[in-house]
Structure formats: C-alpha cells, structure tokens
Amino acid sequence: MIEVVAELSRGPVFLAGEALECVVTVTNPLPPTATSASSEALAWASAQIHCQFHASESRVVLPPPDSSQPDVQPDSQTVFLPHRDSYSEVLPIEGPPSFRGQSVKYVYKLTIGCQRVNSPITLLRVPLRVLVLTGLQDVRFPQDEAVAPSSPFLEEDEGGKKDSWLAELAGERLMAATSCRSLHLYNISDGRGKVGTFGIFKSVYRLGEDVVGTLNLGEGTVACLQFSVSLQTEERVQPEYQRRRGAGGALSVSHVTHARHQESCLHTTRTSFSLPIPLSSSPGFCTAVVSLKWQLHFEFVTSREPGLVLLPPMEQSEPATWTGPEQVPVDTFSWELPIKVLPTSPTLASYAVPGPSTSTITI
C-alpha cells in the first residue's frame, strides 16, 4: 500500500499569474512486523493543472472542437519530480476565473496521477479557486533588483520574488480602485412624480466588503409604502453562443441574489441598508462565452393616491376607534444600478473555502 498526500500550504485560493506550489508526500506505511520485501514500488507520478469548462446544453451552443490543437503541454511543465518534494506551476494569467454559474462553469483542479508497479493508474484531484484581476497580464516583472521588493535577510528565488511582487501589485491596485469615496446621488421617480433620492459612496467593491446605501424619502411627492434592494449577479451568454428559444430568440440571461433588504417605509423620512458581498462569490468578468456583472436591483411599491396618510388624527373631541384602510391602490416599479466587484486577496478568500487544503489517496 502506498499513500499519496497533496498539501497546498498557502491555501486553495490563488491569483492568476501566481505560482501554485503543492507539497506531495509519498509514503509506504508498513506494520511493525513487515519486512523490506513487503514494501511497494511507485512506477511514476505526474501533476498537472486543469481548468474544466462545462456548458449547459439548454443555454449554450458551442462550436465543434478544433482537432488541430492538441491539448498537450511540454513535459517540463507537467511532470512532477519526486526528488524535489513539491510541484510548482504558474497559473495562466489570461485564463478565466473559477465560476459556477447556471450557463457555464469554470472549475480548476490540480490532478496528480500515479501508478504502482503492476497496478492501474490512480488520480488524485485537488480543487483550486482562481481569482483574476484584469490588467495584470499587461504588467511586466521588473528586472532591476532595486525596484523589485525584497528582503536582505531572506533567500528568495526568482519565482518567489515574482509572486510577492505580483501579490503586492494586485493589492495596491485593489486598494486604489476600491478606496475612492465620493457621494453619488440618484433621483428615483415613477410616472407620477419623485419618490426619493438614493445615495451611495462608491461603485467599486472587493469581495467581502459591504455595499452601503441611503434612501431619502422625505423629498418625494409620491408616497412609498415599501421597498426592497437585492445584491445580484447577472450571467449573460455572449450572442454568438446563445441557444435560440422560439422565433424571438430570447437571451440566455440568469440572475442570482446574494443578499437582500426589504423594508416598509410609509412615513419614513430617511433609511439605510448594508448588503455584504460573499467571499465565496465570483467577481465580475468577461470571457468569449459568458460575462458576469453585478448590480443593485430595487423594487418600489408606491401609492396611487396623492398625499396618502395612514395615521389616525392627532386631535379628537371624543374617544374613537381608528382602523386603517383595508386596501390601498398601489403601483410597483423596479430599477437596476450597476456596480463593479473585484477580487480580494487570496489569503482572505481562503476563509470562504471550507475544509482542509490537504487531499489523500491510497493506491
């Protein structure tokens, strides 16, 4: 019996362009009474990173595969060398992010293949999550040692320096893009007048942040009875890959709600909400097959009666019982506000991945 253990020491989440390093341990556990003749021999072992693409046949039409492009990489990039104790490979910076949608799925796995002498091949699959930050593929690693961040007390190889530099650059770009705050105001109106004013301090966020907004209904001329706001993602298949439905050719679009706030707001002057962006969700992206965008989806319920008042009179000469109206004629309308959601640091995103970063198989 041979036991193979694969461990991602830094966690299962990586940034596209970083080097994935997996420590692979191959042992031959034997009972105390076993002899050297009882040991097993490992014929070979290899490792490779895969991005599996899955498409819904009811939503996506894909062209036939191109047989002229073999799905093979050079041996120097795919073979695991046991004497080095670990497997290291740079994740392609131009690849798609990890995503599990209703139309398509992009699933990353580290596959370790091994074979015992005179036994069938066994595969160990280690799940990964890859985050993509647009724009990093256009940046080159600095060659000047004075520019590249380094420590004189640590021995780093060229790959380690590049990874630390890439992570630092990604952190700086994320901080610069999401730290800018400026109040944006939007007037909300229906066909009969102004309902209120919505305020938000920024439109670019990172995974794990909260979307905070305020709603001022005191300035409205139309009474708002209730409102709800949902944090949604919109998954849209690109036109050339859409499966047509009927003569009209409906678009392959699906929405997923990640957080929602609902409030009854008659006689409310000002209110606010906070919607958390899950660490486990996917940031916005666009590939040749599908695009993912984030938005705030508002739904308002307004009264058709001008100057609606549903409070009992303040002054009465005699005690009386007051009851509100059983029915109120209302109108409903919706509004979408696009926002941008970027990835976060792989270390922070790892907290959203349950379970250990170690996989084991026995052959």
Image (cartoon, grey):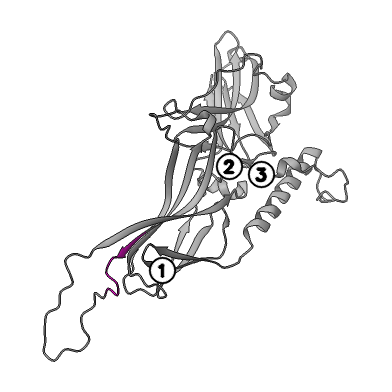
Q: Amino acid at mark 3?
A: Thr
SS for dot 2: strand
91 versus 44 height, above or below = below
Which is more toward the observer, 317 or 80?
317
Query: CB of mark 3 within 8 Å of CB of mark 2?
Result: yes
Residue marked by disc 1: 194
Residue 134: mark:
3
SS for dot 1: strand
Query: CB of mark 3 within 8 Å of CB of mark 1?
Result: no
SS for dot 3: loop
Answer with mark 2 or mark 1, whichever residue precedes in sequence. 1
Answer with mark 3 or mark 1, whichever residue precedes in sequence. 3
Residue, x 27% and y 69% (percent of image)?
305
Residue 285: mark:
2
- 10 Å crowding of disc 2: few (<14), some (14-19), many (20+): many
In the picture, measured across the screen, residue 308 lies left or right of residue 340, that is left
Which is more toward the observer, 104 or 46?
104
In the picture, measured across the screen, residue 23 lies left or right of residue 119, that is right
